[in-house]
Image (cartoon, helix red, strand yellow):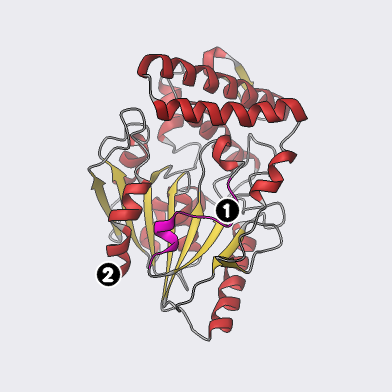
Amino acid sequence: MKLPLINGVIVDLDDDMDLYFFHEYLQWQNHTQNKLRIEKNKSILDKKILSDYSKMYLQRAYTGGWKFAEKDVYRFDNHFYEFPNECNTMCISKKDTKHDTLIIQLVAYGGHELRLKIPFSSTSKEIYNSNADVLLVNDSPLRFPEFLHPSFLLMGCSDRLNTMEKMSQEIRDIIKKKEEKENNKYKKIIVYADSRHAGSGVSLACYMDDIVDAAFIIHGTSVYDFDESPIVKKYFENPEAEILPVHWMHLVKTYQLKYRYNIDKELLDPFRYLNNYNIKVDYYHGKFDLEYADFLNYIKQFDNNNLTLHEVDYQFSSTQTHWIRGHVDKNILPEWLSCV
């Protein structure tokens, strides 16, 4: 399928060279748009994001690849975590206190400036210090090609764990090791997911519904089916409408997932099938988040008895309205955990 994408550039969604160069072009567009936004809004936060992004891409320009990032993303903190897996995508918290609740956190870092410098053994202090153990699951940030990966964990989390089945089995293995070590079986297992994993968090929870009790979701991408995605539909309704760079890649990746890799429809569109599973889902969305409003409207069309939507009256800044996770982790998650 050939489509005119950003700035009318014709891209063949079945041609890997087209997709490679489109991803590179999009990164340049993202860079220039960030500079224009800074000139307009004078935001210190936006300046920092652009600076970190530029430093990361300049290292790639100087070295010819992302190999330099290995030392950061594969770094393991054995003081706070244990049982790192072979491909450095999973580990579990190491705490002095035994807990009856386990959080399986699907980690999502948005841009290269974060994804390629933060170790796989790290999460927010609010999540780590919660009254629960935490099992981290990361998309391998050095998995390629970039026009497909990170693939929302719907193709697993690494080249070794390249399916939902393999990835979920690895999660089960780590849980078993932890329970055997602590001689303590978890009474509640929760999937925590946000941003690009908002939908795939529900997909994983349903896939592992024999041991998972609930999902705590913070607003983001809720559907990955090319034919159902509101972002893709918006594009076909008006190909010249302004679309965010991250949403252009959503269009590219959802096509790959559905038409080239034939990912199961229930994984691509989890809210459509949520009533088939006994999973309680609490979904928190920002009151001022316009970037992902279409994905929120999408899930509202389904009459899901086990889904509860929560509007969060918070915005991080005038230019960063989507990011509510810090507020939710600090002010909402602890109480939610105590009641689940």
Q: Is residue 126 magenta?
A: yes
**What numbered label is drawn on residue 339?**
2
Name which residue type carries label 2: Cys
In front here: 196 or 277? 196
Where does the C terminus fall, quadrant-wise?
bottom left
x, y percentage for residue 21? 68, 23
Name the residue that disc number 1 marks: 138
Q: Is residue 158 above or below residue 186?
A: above
In front here: 305 or 281? 281
Earlier sequence position, callout 1 versus callout 2: 1
Q: Can residue 340 be seen from the camera position used here?
A: no
Name which residue type carries label 1: Asn
Dot 1: element: strand
The range drawn in magenta is: 118-130
Q: CA distance from mark 1 to mark 2?
A: 27 Å
**Circle count:** 2
Dot 2: element: helix
x, y percentage for residue 182? 53, 83
